[in-house]
């Protein structure tokens, strides 16, 4: 029994109604909180009801492709390109606004590991619960139970409530269940970004086993190395559109090239921004400690975010606040540099110029990050650009010990200077 | 192992079409059936975690109606001296509190259930209706405990059992169905309007006093009794009293009232299911 395709989409599109955020009289705290929430498409919608204007966003727009049975396809694209929306539509969590998708085969989706884990239940109970949530039958779970426990290396703790697990144990258990999901078609979202390195390898290994067994996999990730390893074919999404579909290497190259050529980032033609717009950021780039323009940051080295801005008239801009928010690749806000917090008196800016936000020792480990820029004048938001620029950070000697933050440790992302003391009794 | 693989091969390859559904989408009963195991596991989870990390555990299931019974017996039985159809007041009150406690807890749990499981709704597909259904079903375990207390009371007051007891399972099914219909409707409203969370305490309080739990319908003037009959719970609660206590006062079922409750319950069920299905498709976007 074979079918010409496993997944076929035809003009699949999804429209989100976004609330107009830049409102008069909003407190700074609210706007910052909102800007943090904004990366989560659902919270955008939640608050859209209270907003007084609406903007529409095509998270996916006319996406058509066909995937043959047994193909392993990687989906790649910048944040907000529509990758997750595509997976959500194919896994029937949300409906397309337009278009149609057809799927032949038993489908399983893995948008998260440990979905539905309950902290009060034991590891054993959670395997059953999570397995059934992921679409396994009870018989399937029973027959794979020992294998799952062994894979997670949790034989001794299987009857302990998972709230007593360490985070590593928790993730291992969650992965073990997920890794034993064996539908004909598997949809996987960026889930391999957690867990320790050895375990990550084990999971990737298990996944490529699955891939070799003729299963169809659609795999969304920022991890280009993993994509290259696992996939034969790539789909590149940009602003909701499918811009490239072909062999994985050229697709990844195109994706990376798209990230690079845009530095220094010209912001004048950037539409996805909010605020009154009388003052606008025009360019953003990075400099190192000696004032050279750089393409990436280095952990522990100075990083300067250089923001050029222009105003429509020639008056000085009183009482300004500028902020640069650093997000990780999954859209989590990591930290926020806010002028108001470090400069005591209100700032008056010249009508146009260049602002430099200087981070003396970049506290980020090797990864990709995204920056959001914000400027208000007299408490009125003038310009606010989400995901204005991507920042690639390469590992550097942050701690001055020559040791790098190990790949795959939890808490990867922000590095914090600290010291230790010990006293004997 | 071999059997299992053979089974996988024999199973027909499912074919799924994903497209925008209309507002009036049809009921997908096949889907509900396919996900029956998940339904079982979610119910089982709700039962399991219900009294975790509480000192008294499942005792809470009986403490609530027992305390209410004592309180009501003092205030309404002793002080206000409400009539109770020739039945000792505590017994009268408990026979009403038994289904009521189940019902009010079930609608409370069910209406909060979708929002409480938003992490599931945004990450996996399954027929959403099994979430409120599991919440209601999990409450049946509490109901069983309450029945045990009722049994003790029946022995204590030496109530002779009657053949009317046969109706008890039917009444439990009817109560559960009404709770499911109400809870499902409230749960889908709660996704969009979190106001529901604040409405529910009022709703249950009002509904309790509008239902003959602490007083008999017979206490009301004949010409106003029909107003109470509009409440589907009235016939149900009276039914429980007849099933459990008719050995004491020779009462008999008011079939018209029960029939009317069935009718209202079915109407509400159809409406709730319709409403739920039509909003289900946007849950993940707005929750």
Image: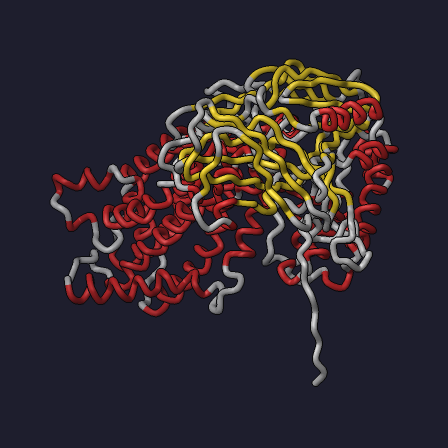
- Image label count: 0
Observer-nearest residue: A65 or A103? Answer: A65
Q: Quadrant of residue B60?
A: bottom left
* The quadrant where residue A91 appears: top right
Q: Residue at x 48, y 63 (%)?
A: B58
Question: What residue lies at 66% left-to-right and 33% top-to-bottom?
Answer: A285
Q: Is residue B165 left or right of residue B49?
A: left
Q: Position of residue B102 (x, y in %)?
A: 40, 52
- Please say whether residue A163 is visible from this viewpoint: yes
Extreme residue in the bottom direction: A425
Q: In this view of the protein, which residue sits in the foreground, B129 or B162?
A: B129
Which quadrant of the rendered structure holds the N terminus of chain B? top right
Spot occupied by residue A246 in the image (x, y as percentages of width and height): 81, 19
Image: A200 above or below B273: below
Left or right relative to A325: residue A425: right
Query: Can the viewer see residue B185 in this picture?
Result: no
Is A292 situated above or below A282? below
Q: Position of residue A378 (x, y in %)?
A: 39, 37
């Amino acid at each position: 029994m074979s079918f010409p395709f496993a997944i076929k989409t035809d003009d699949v599109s999804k429209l989100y109604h976004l609330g107009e955020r830049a409102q008069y009289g909003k407190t700074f705290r609210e706007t910052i909180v909102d800007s943090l929430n904004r990366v989560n498409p659902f919270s955008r919608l939640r608050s859209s009801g209270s907003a007084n204007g609406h903007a529409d966003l095509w998270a996916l727009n006319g996406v058509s492709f066909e995937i043959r049975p047994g193909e392993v396809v990687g989906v790649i694209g910048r944040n907000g390109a529509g990758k997750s929306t595509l997976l959500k539509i194919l896994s029937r969590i949300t409906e397309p606004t337009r278009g149609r998708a057809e799927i032949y085969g038993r489908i399983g989706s893995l948008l998260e590991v440990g979905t539905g884990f309950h902290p009060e239940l034991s590891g054993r109970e959670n395997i059953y619960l999570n397995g059934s949530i992921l679409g396994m039958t009870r018989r399937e779970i029973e027959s794979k139970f020992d294998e799952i426990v062994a894979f997670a290396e949790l034989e001794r703790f299987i009857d302990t409530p998972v709230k007593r697990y360490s985070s590593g144990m928790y993730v291992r258990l969650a992965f073990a269940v997920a890794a034993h999901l064996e539908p004909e078609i598997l949809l996987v979202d960026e889930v391999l970004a957690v867990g320790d390195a050895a375990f990550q390898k084990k999971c990737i290994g298990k996944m490529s086993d699955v891939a070799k067994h003729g299963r169809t996999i659609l795999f969304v990730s920022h991890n280009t190395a993993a994509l290259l390893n696992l996939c034969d074919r790539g789909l590149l999404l940009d602003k909701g559109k499918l811009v490239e579909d072909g062999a994985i290497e050229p697709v990844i190259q195109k994706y990376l090239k798209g990230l690079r050529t845009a530095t220094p980032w010209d912001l004048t033609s950037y539409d996805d921004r909010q605020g009154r717009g009388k003052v606008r950021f025009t360019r953003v780039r990075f400099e190192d400690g000696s004032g050279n323009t750089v393409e990436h940051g280095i952990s522990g080295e100075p990083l300067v975010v250089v923001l050029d801005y222009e105003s429509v008239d020639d008056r000085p801009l009183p009482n300004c606040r500028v902020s640069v928010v650093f997000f990780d690749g999954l859209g989590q806000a990591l930290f926020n540099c806010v002028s108001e917090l470090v400069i005591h008196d209100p700032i008056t800016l010249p009508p146009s110029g260049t602002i430099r936000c200087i981070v003396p020792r970049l506290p980020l480990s090797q990864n990709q990050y995204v920056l959001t820029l914000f400027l208000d004048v007299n408490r009125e938001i003038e310009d606010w650009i989400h995901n204005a620029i991507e920042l690639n950070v390469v590992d550097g000697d942050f701690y001055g010990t020559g040791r790098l933050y190990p790949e795959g440790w939890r808490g990867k992302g922000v590095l914090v200077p600290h010291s230790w003391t010990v006293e004997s009794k | 192992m071999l059997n299992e693989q053979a089974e996988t091969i024999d199973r027909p390859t499912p074919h799924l079409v994903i497209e925008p559904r209309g507002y009036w989408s049809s009921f997908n009963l096949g889907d509900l059936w396919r996900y029956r195991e998940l339904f079982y596991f979610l119910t089982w989870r709700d039962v399991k975690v219900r009294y975790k990390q509480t000192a008294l555990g499942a005792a809470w299931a009986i403490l609530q109606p027992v305390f209410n019974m004592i309180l009501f017996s003092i205030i309404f039985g002793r002080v206000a001296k409400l009539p109770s159809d020739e039945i000792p007041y505590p017994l009268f009150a408990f026979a009403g509190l038994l289904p009521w406690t189940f019902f009010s807890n079930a609608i409370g749990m069910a209406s909060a259930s979708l929002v409480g499981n938003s992490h599931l709704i945004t990450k996996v597909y399954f027929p959403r209706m099994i979430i409120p259904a599991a919440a209601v079903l999990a409450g049946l375990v509490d109901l069983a405990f309450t029945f045990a207390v009722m049994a003790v009371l029946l022995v204590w007051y030496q109530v002779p059992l009657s053949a009317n007891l046969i109706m008890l399972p039917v009444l439990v099914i009817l109560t559960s169905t009404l709770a499911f219909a109400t809870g499902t409707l409230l749960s889908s409203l709660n996704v969009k309007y979190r106001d529901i969370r604040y409405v529910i305490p009022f709703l249950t309080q009002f509904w309790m006093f509008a239902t003959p739990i602490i007083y008999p319908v017979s206490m009301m003037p004949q010409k106003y009794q029909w107003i109470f009959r509009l409440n589907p719970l009235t016939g149900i609660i009276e039914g429980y009293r007849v099933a459990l206590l008719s050995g004491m006062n020779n009462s008999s079922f008011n079939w018209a009232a029960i029939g009317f409750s069935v009718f209202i319950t079915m109407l509400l069920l159809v409406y709730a299911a319709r409403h739920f299905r039509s909003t289900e498709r946007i849950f993940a976007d707005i929750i």
